[in-house]
Structures are given as structure tokens and as C-alpha cells.
Image (spheres, rainbow, N blue to C red):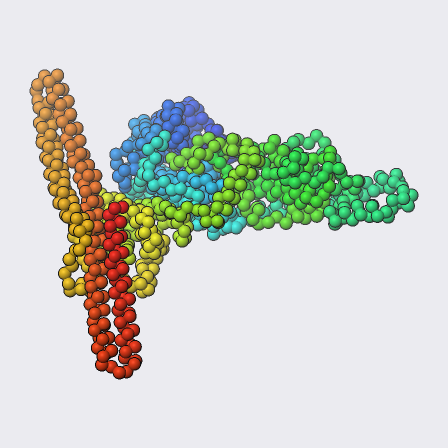
Amino acid sequence: MKVVVTGASGLLGRAVHAHFAAQSHEVLALANSRAASGSNLVQLDLLDTVAFATLVHDFAPDVIVHTAAERRPDVVQRDPDRCHTLNAEVPGRIASICKEAGKQARLIYISTDYVFDGSRPPYQVDSESNPLNAYGTSKLLGERAVAEQGQAGKTTSLRVPVLYGDAIEPSESAVNVLTTTIVAPSDDRKISMDAYAVRYPTNVADVAKVIEQIARMAVENHKDLPPILHFQATEAMTKYDMCNVMCRLQNRNAPPLPEASVTHLEPEYDVDPMAATSRPRHCKMDTSVLQSFGVDVTHVSFESWWGEEMEKQASLVTKAKEEAEANAALALSSADEANGVQEGKDRDSVSGAEPSPQESGTGDSPENATYINQTEEIHPDGAASRPTPMPAPHAEPGDLSTITAKAGHDSVAKASAPSAVPLATPSSPNPSFSSLRGRPTPPGTSDVRSPSTSQAPSLRNAEGAISLAVESSETIVSASDIAQAPVDSHSNIAGSSGHQASEDAPSDSSDAAAAQAGQTQTSLGSAGGLAAAAQLSDSTIAETVGRTQHSPSGATDDDIYGQPSPRPHGTEPASSLSLASDSAREATEANTDSKIHSEVNGTAKSSYLFLIKVGDPHKVGESMTGHILYTVRTQTDAAGFRASQFSVLRRYSDFRWLHAALVHNNPGIIIPPVPEKVRGLISRFSPDLVETRRQGLERMVNKVANHPELAKDDDLKLFLESDDFGRDVKLRDAMKGPVPTPEAKTWMGWSGTVGVNSGQKFHEHDEWFDQQRAYLDSLEAQLKQMVKSLNTLAQTRKDLADSIAAHSHALLMLSASSLSRSLSACFAGLGDLHRRAQELEDIQSDSDTRHFGSVLYEYERIVGSVRKAFSTRIDCWHLMQKADDELRRVRTKHEKVKRESAASHYYEESLKDLAEAETYALECHANFDLVSRRTKDEMKR
């Protein structure tokens, strides 16, 4: 089978090209701007229709897979006219060329799930499309152009979601680029991360496999291609969920990979209304048509692929470290050999010219002996006596040999008298020593800020890693030797020259530059310094590799495959960030130290904040055992929690348990209500009910967590943190006793705890509570009346909508009668106007019931919570009465024992029982007073 693949230099195009070639098909891979990136790519501009038509005529392909497109939504949104040609017009031209060719080639056009608005998943192939941005619109127009200009049965549009895979750069995919965000930045900046839009990340290898099966079915089995096909993986995840998975997998391989974290990510659970490009919320697509066509839709799981990818990256890092150590050892050997040869030549050249120590009179003087001892302490291996070699002539500023020569030159102490220039501290005005401080290298082309202050070489190949390690080893040599050696006033410090060269030269080094480190015309300094360079620590290389292996580069736009790249708040371009001065960095470090110092000394704020999101509802189980699970995500600065951000899964009954536990633990406090339980098996899983319940649960748990007293409850902490909630609740009940969970009703009070009733009728003695009960009764009555009025209004609106619909239908029928054309047009317009008015009345009726009714429903449940709080006070009163009755009984018994019993031990036991009964009665009185005060405070709050 002969195949043409357009856009073969992209992430998906490379995968398609590789898979077809692996299946022994004859493949012609086309690319334009990046054709030089592969030796087997043919450069061709798809805008040149004549050239492409000639290629199709000469090659006569069976299948054309069109993957080329402008796939960055923000770029398309900013310049829709320019991108319209590539995304909308070119697919139609290709379809027309396929139709006109003598051998009709099949066309598989790659589209996107962005043709949907994401409001009503799952989407069938014939579902109504409604793109929210220019990118989705352009791809939809491309689909229509293919269908209109191509031949039916010979063309198809394959819609796919966000993709990931084996990328050259992380910026090629909106999923791969997330690996650059899970390494925490050097400061305390927060990075916003999308936790709202549900995606179905799919591997490009799976997409390539599906495309090959579609092509084979069409060509070999002579099947007609369906006009639209859907394919995506089945794992629903937000970008924040993807970051959590990647973080866990990367930490399994740390070290050598850098340790990852998501604590610096700030999940966004709501759509940004000010965003320049709108994106759909949930674009789940149905793949049944693709399966009926005979295509296997199995796919690799997200976690398994990324687990293997992280292991592969770890092995590359380890290999790069080993090669760097081997190169450092080789450089050490070459330097020792070169210095030995040079020493021999120097001794031979000066042996006849220098007088003997006896002739000069300075052979064994104390001063000379002292200086020799000092130099031997600086360089124990005798390197202090070596002459200083000159730098290589005609060396470029960015040449590694020049940097290495300067490092060796400055790290070796001269054998002459000590220099008059003293050793300077890091803050010294001496320019050579001041330049030893870390300076940023020129930034990369990406506008996403790198985690480090310099743009290090790419570690996608071993060459970059070896060069990086050699550069790091040279820095270690210069730093260790300069710290002790005297300095000549006319020499340059290795750190200064090295950093200056790095600022002038490109950030990526080559094998040729690395090989120059061992040339005999340069000196690498003392053997002791290079030995220190050979001992590269695991953490140094792993940290550097972690910062560089995912460094984004490429175009300035940061939206990949329809996904916005994460960006910290207030991020500036990398070019401006790299110009930060040393004083600015010192101020940042000092500010960070002061924050830490203030927290250690107890100056941190005492009140804690909670931000809790309840989302991602999904059904678990079937029929009788089915229920809805919610993801509860928590952000807090409160102490005592396992992290500042964490998430757990909870069902509706777990929220009801939390409510009952809080009522039981905190008598007198008004506990925010949970949505009422719905009876029945059909309506409880309806989308509207699930969404309404989710909103109610989210409001309830946020009010609880931000309550000054309820936030301290241990059961709340258990609810928010426990990963095995059922087991932990059983352990909690074993220690503290089970939580009473009576069925809560909207307007009915809390049914008193079993066994609490003292047998006496409660009579209110506090006029304030009587007034509040009267107020609650009146409020309930008004709420009921308002609910009744709202239902009447909604029903009236529905009746009006039905009447308007009937009138609209009559007008439209009248417009079709044999009247004059102008009169028919007027009736048709009036009928259409009434139809739209009927739709608005329907929408208004539903809105009144949903929004206004939900507010009334919330207030009704709040009234029920207040009554529960009042009822707990009555329970405390009954306990107090029972305690008083018990005290009177024990006191009577004690008086009887005191009069009749002569035995002392009976009297002591009776006295002990009396003391316990009095203590318990006092506690009950105090508890009743406390609950009364707490209830009044809650009503005021």
C-alpha cells in the first residue's frame, strides 16, 4: 500500500510515518519548515497546489493521511484569516486532487474534538457541532470542505482529542509540556493549572495504529469510508489530574530524575471568563462507528506509558552521568600527561640558565622554605611548581578549549613571589572574584520561564549531557582551586571567563567543544582539582538534567494541540528574566529567609483558610447498588494536614455521615445542611439532580471548613484526608462510639437521641428561644408560601409558552396558504418571532425553578439545621434533668446509709457515689449553659 503523510515532522505525523513504515508500506513523508529534521522527509509547501497535484500524480498513492495543520488555538484566534487557508482550504484542495486523480486515493483528514462545545457529552459522529473558538471553527470548515470537494466513500475526517507521545521537545504536546511544571520553581510562585476541562489524552502511537487499520480496511477490503469517525482513549482526566499522575511516576525514579511536586500548582476549577480563547469543558466522543468499521480501539493506559517514559528518562540520565565521569577521567589523564611533558621541556630549557641554590645563596633559607611549604599545602601533588601555560591562540570567546585553558591557568599557583592582590570575598569589588557569583546564561527562545536561571543543553541526546557534565566539572575545578591559590593581578579567574563565555556562546555545546578539553595545547589545572571534578555527585547531575530535559522551546505561542500551556502568575519572557541582577537575587533570598524566620518564631497567621472543590461526579455500580462518587479536592494552609493540597473520593452518604458527626460532636452549633436524600431509582442519577447536589455538597463542606469551631473537628479532618474512609470510620467508631445518623427532614426538627428523654416535658424558661422559634415558624410559613407562588409562576409561564407555540404554529400554517407573497412573508416572520418567544418563556420557567427555587430550598434546609441545634439544647436539658434525678436518688440513699449503716466501707462507697453524681450533675448544668450560649452566638453569626 502506497501512502502519503503530510505534516510528517510533527508529533502525530512522525508516529503515523513510523507505523506505516513498520508495516512494510511504501510511505512518502512530506514536511515544510522542518523537513531538514529527518533525512527521509520530502519538503513541499501544501499551499502550492500544483506541486502537490504533480506529486500525487507521479506517486499514485492509495491513501493520503493529512495531519498538517496549525494546531495552536491561541495562534488561530489571533490570526484566523491566515490560519484559515491551512486548516480549512487546504484539506478541500487535497480532497479535490484525490477525486480528480486517475487512481482515486483515499483521504484521511485529522480533525479535533474542539468542533464541539463540550456541554452535552458523549458526542456521536452525527451530533451537532458548535465550536467555541476559531481553531475548532477552522477544523470544522476543513471537514465540510473534504466532504463537499471529495468523493463520498473515499474521504473521512477522524476526530481525535489532545495527544501525547514520544516528543522531540515537550512543547510539541499539551500533555508532554506538563512535565516541565511538576518540578517546583526556585521561588514561591504559584502556577495556574486547569482542573475544569475534562480531556481524554490519547497516545499518538494508538492513533497511528487506528489510521493504518482504517486505510487497510478501505484499500484491501474495498470498504467505503464513513464521512466522520471518532477515536479517543477512555481515561477522563483534567490537566491537574495528569500532573498528579506524572508527579507520582517521576518520584518513583527520583533520583536520578529530579523530585517532582504539585504543591506549587494552583488548580482552577472554573472557566476563566476573560480568557482570549474559549475551550470546551467535556468532549467525550463515541467510538462505536469506528468499531463497527472493524477497527480495534484498544489503547495504552496513560499511567503505564508515562511510567515507562519516566524509566527511560532515568536511564538516559544515568547513562549521561556515566559518560560524563568517563570523559572527566579521560580529561584528567590527558591533562596529567600534557603537564608532565610540558614540565620536562621547561626543566630542560631553564636548567642551564638558572644558578644552583648554593650559588644564589637562597637554597635553604627560612623564607624560601616557608613559601615552598605554603605552595605544597595548596597543591600537595606538586602542581605549584608547574609553569602557567598560555591560552590557545585565535580561540573564540565561546570555545570550550579557551574556557578550559583559562580555568587551568587560574587554578594553578605561580612559583614566583606571591601576588600583591589579596584573596577577595564573594562580595569583594575585585571584578574577577565578583564574577564567580552565578550569572544567568542567555535564555532560550521559549517564553515559558525555565525552572533554572540558565538555559542548559538539551539532554534528549547523550552528547548534551556529556558536555553539560564537563562544563560542570570545570566549574568545580576553578572554584576549589581559586579558594586557596594566590592570584596574579594580570590573570583572569576561571569563573569569570567561563561565565562570560557562556553568555556570549550558545547554550548547547557540542562533542567537538568537549573533545578540545583534552588537547595538549591547553592546561586543565592541577591534578587535585580535576580529581574533584571527576567526583560528580548524583544530585548535581540529576538536578541539572531534570531542569533541562523538559525545557520548552520553539514557537512563542504556548498552546499545543488545543491545550493552554501552564504559566505562572505574572510570568515575564525568559529574555527579561535572564537579566536579573545579583542584588535582586540577594533581595529575594533575604525575603525568603525572613519569611521562614517569622514562621519559626510564631508570627504566622493564626486563622486558616480552606478552599474545597467537589467535582467530577461519576456513577459507580448498576441498578440497586449504583451510587455517585465525587472528588473532593482541598487546599488549606491549616496545620495538621498531610499536605496543603490533596484529594479524596466520597459518596453522598459520606457527606451525610459528616453532617451527623458534626451535629453529635458540636451541640448548639448550626451545622450547614446537606442536600436532602432523593427517593427512587430513576431520578437520582439525572444530570440536573447530580449537578444540583454537587453544588449543595460543595457549599456545605466549605461552610463547615471555614467555621471557626467546626474546622477544628477531628471528624472533618478524617473526612477530608482519609484514603480508606470506610475502614477509618470503623476505627473511629471503635474508639469514640458510633455516630447517630437519623434521617434529616427539611422542615422537621432533630429527633432526640434515643435514651435522652428524661420523661419530663420541656418548658422553655428563656424568652429569647421562644422568640426565635416564633421567628422560625413565621419564616417557614413564608418560605412555603413563596415556594407555592414560584411553582404557580413556573406553571403559568409553561402554559403561556404552550399558548404561544400554538399561535406560532397557526401563523406558520397561514403563511403557507395561497396568499400574496408579501403577506405570507409577514405571517412567516411573525410566526418565527412567536416561536422564539415561546423558547424564551420555556427557558425563563426552567430558570425560575432551578435558580430561585434552589435558593429557597437552601433556606428551608438552613431552618432545619437551626431546629436541630435547638433540639440538641433540649437533649442537654433532658440529660440535666436525668442527672438531677440521679443526684437526688443517690443523695437519699447516702442519707439512709449514713443513718443506718455502721460499716465504714458502705459509707465510703456511698460518699463516692454521691461525689460522682454531683460532679456529673454540675457538668450537665454547665453543658446546658454552654449549649445555650453557643446557640445564641450562632444565631447572631
**Closer to us: 635 or 884:** 884
Quadrant hosting residue 921: bottom left
* Residue at image point 38% right, 28% down: 76
Q: Dividing the image into 4 quarters, which one contains the N terminus?
A: top left
Q: Is residue 560 visible?
A: no
**Closer to us: 883 or 368:** 883
Q: Position of residue 797 (x, y in %)?
A: 12, 34
**Closer to us: 486 or 151:** 486
Q: Position of residue 278 (x, y in %)?
A: 34, 33
Q: Where is 120 relative to 727, above or below?
A: above
Q: Is residue 601 visible?
A: yes
* Residue at image point 50% right, 46% down: 597
User: Image check: 732 left or right of 847?
Assistant: right
Q: Position of residue 710 (x, y in %)?
A: 31, 52
Quadrant hosting residue 55: top left
**Closer to us: 828 or 791:** 791
Q: Where is 327 relative to 801, above or below?
A: below
